[in-house]
Image (spheres, rainbow, N blue to C red):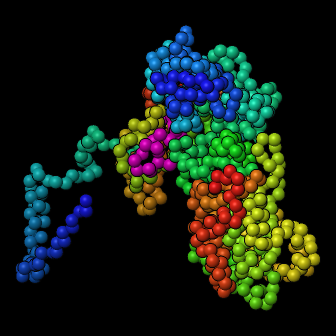
Amino acid sequence: MPVVTIDSRQVDVEPGTTILKAALKLGIDIPVFCYHDGLPVAANCRMCLVEVKGSPKPLPACEVQVRDGMEVLTRSQVALDARKAVLELILLNHPVDCPICDQAGECVLQDHYFEHSATPSRIQVSKVHKAKAVPLGPNVMLDRERCINCTRCVRFCREVSGSRQLTQVHRGNHTEIAVFPGRQFDDPYSLCAVDLCPVGALTSRDFRFRQRAWSLESSPAICPECSRGCNVLADAANGRLFRIRPRNNPDVNRWWACDHGRLAFRRFEERRADRSLVDYKPQPPTRQATLEAADVAAGRLQAIRSNGGRILLVLSSMLSLEEGFAALRFASSILGEKLVLLAPRGGGTADSLLRTADSNANRSGLTRLAAALGLETADLAGFFASPSAAEVAGLVSAGAEYEVPPLPAGARISEAVAFSHCLDAVADKATVLLPIPGHFEKDGHYANCDGRVQRSASAIAAPEAAVQLHVLLSRIASKMSGTLGYGDMTSVRSAALSLSGTGEGSNA
Amino acid sequence: MVAKVKKVGLPPLNVAESLYVTELVRGLITTNRHFWRNWFRRKDTATLEYPDKRRPYSARWRGLHRLMLRENGTPRCVACMMCSTHCPAGCITIVAREHPDPAIEKVPASFEIDLLKCIFCGFCEEACPCDAIRVDSGVHAPPVYGRDEAIIDLEDLLSRGSQSTAKQGGRNL
Ligand code: SF4
Ligand code: SF4
Ligand code: SF4
Ligand code: SF4
Ligand code: FES
């Protein structure tokens, strides 16, 4: 295997390794613009130039592969001068309008300039100006002046998403990113191009101007929009979510996430259940009021039970394993049921890259959990259509966002207690509605389509009235003269994870 | 380090003080002394006949903030939020919006300063890359009846604005 010397340190690497990767192995950082682990090498920005002994010119580290006995200098005068010159060229016509540029604060050009150049411009003549704020597609805005022509976005559309919608036109100073005439950049993964763009040339039209990058705090979450379970970062400020970005997980989503999933988070703000409802009447928006409403629900469920009525659990496939475990345990030990009704969310569309047709975050995990607890499962709609549905006297619905099927013929359901984060069709039918934290407001585990269990951290605080599902269920259980036995999150989590099996290669 | 707290009580009153009338008379003597001295000998009077006469302000007096204007009278502010980021009191709240002219691109939709939080340090002025905000109007913060009224908005800030001679960044620099 070739042995290379980089900055007088030796490293042994596989044949075909680039200088950049070999240096990374030694912990030496070489600045790049156009190189990205997930894209083919283009080597067009020249930011990564390094000095190689015996070579007449500095060489691009991202492209040049190591030879045995190669001697590389990444911090020699030649390399430093090369970087400075490249930055001067890139900044020649760059508008440097950082104050109004959404990328400021997370801009690779800003960072490289401060680290490797930090010298004022020597240009005497007017800069070449280009179009600003050009809407390229429904989700992406282009600033042609800020583009450094790294072609990351072009390569993404060509090699990863396959839409081939972006291209470069014109030459030299006038090179621009463009879509083909009469087309727009409506790639379902177009926001990945925004992430890839090292500068503020491509910006998200949704996030644009809403917050400065430095005021955001990121939490590692899991996208709830389909069963792929893409790893994402949820960026929040002042208790509100502003942006969802993909987080690299080589086994699940790599660096990508679909626009649909990234833009869907606002639905958690719309129609938020921020207080409990008893017989459709809003209660005060406090935790205490929610707990009192839970007591009302407990009393009514107990009344049905003492009359010998049957109460069934309806479980949404969007809940976390922790919530699912608490609900399933409630069904088996308190409601004394062997059957739970699974209520999946509909409306998924698969694509060729990541998105799956199943729009449920945790269907496989909850199904597995129910089986591990020895419970039978039935589909809600299917069960409602069956004759045995007429015997049901009460429903406990955990989670939301599923379609409510028409009630069974001859139904005599007198109570429907719903635990939900939103005021959707399920909540409309509930006689007691108890608010619980929404997806980005809770810490929980989800099993994706491959059975991989992944943790999603909470990014924002839940409204005051929202109480965790296991807390509400244990309270109701104790009022119904039983015990759930799982009153704290630690025990719920460990039980849920050990039952569902964290699965091969899980990042729980 | 925990600061030591020394508790002191009120000094006890002596007999004359506890009689109330003696102290009242002493107070009236002091008041009368000042009154007649000011009446006849106006040299060392501590008070001014405000508002006819005013004290000179310190050259460092800042007063209320204002937002400066472009040549066409529109705000210079581009809602970059440098000022609100830099403000040690965290009293500036800006909401940005798209400007119809892509050469300007970004303007504030709302710009609010909470005067009850502001410490009039002038950091916002120093942070501003556009010479858009200045803390130099010399106008006193007005008295208010409620906390909400102490929040000044974009309109109020612009009403004190004037044109700046500084060149605004962007095109043809
Ligand atoms: S791309 Fe970077 S350097 Fe250019 S204006 Fe935006 S923040 Fe500034
Ligand atoms: S728009 Fe961004 S990603 Fe695309 S070529 Fe320009 S700088 Fe690179
Ligand atoms: S004067 Fe100081 S405290 Fe007041 S708004 Fe400006 S930066 Fe903030
Ligand atoms: S006043 Fe100045 S610093 Fe503050 S947002 Fe406007 S341009 Fe930026
Ligand atoms: S990173 Fe190597 S040439 Fe761009």
Q: Residue at x 40, y 53 (%)?
A: B117
Name the magenta segment's main secondary structure. loop
Residue A407 is at least partly visible in this image: yes
Q: Which residues are magenta?
A: B67-93
Task: Estimate the x, y position of residue B152 in percent, counting from the top left.
Answer: 47, 50
Q: Residue at x 19, y 54 (%)?
A: B47
Q: Vertically, is B33 above or below B169?
A: below
Choose between A80 and A468: the one closer to the eye: A80
Task: Estimate the x, y position of residue A389 in percent, counting from the top left.
Answer: 88, 77
Q: Vertically, is A121 above or below A386?
A: above
Choose between B163 and A139: the one closer to the eye: A139
Task: Estimate the x, y position of residue A211 in percent, counting from the top left.
Answer: 57, 45
Please tell me in which quadrant of the rendered image residue A398 appears.
Answer: bottom right
Choose between B139 and A361: the one closer to the eye: A361
Task: Estimate the x, y position of residue A418 in percent, counting from the top left.
Answer: 73, 72
Residue A80 is at least partly visible in this image: no
**Residue farthest toward the bottom in the current orientation of the protein:** A307
Choose between A275 and A25: the one closer to the eye: A25
| In-image side of B80 versus B120 (left or right) | right
Quarter occupied by the N terminus of chain B: bottom left
Figure disc tally: 0
Magenta span has A326?
A: no
| In-image side of A30 versus B164 (left or right) | right
Q: Residue at x 62, y 74 (%)?
A: A486
Q: Residue at x 71, y 17 (%)?
A: A170
Please tell me in which quadrant of the rendered image residue A444 appears.
Answer: bottom right
Q: Vertically, is A489 above or below A30?
A: below
**Residue farthest toward the front in the current orientation of the protein:** A1
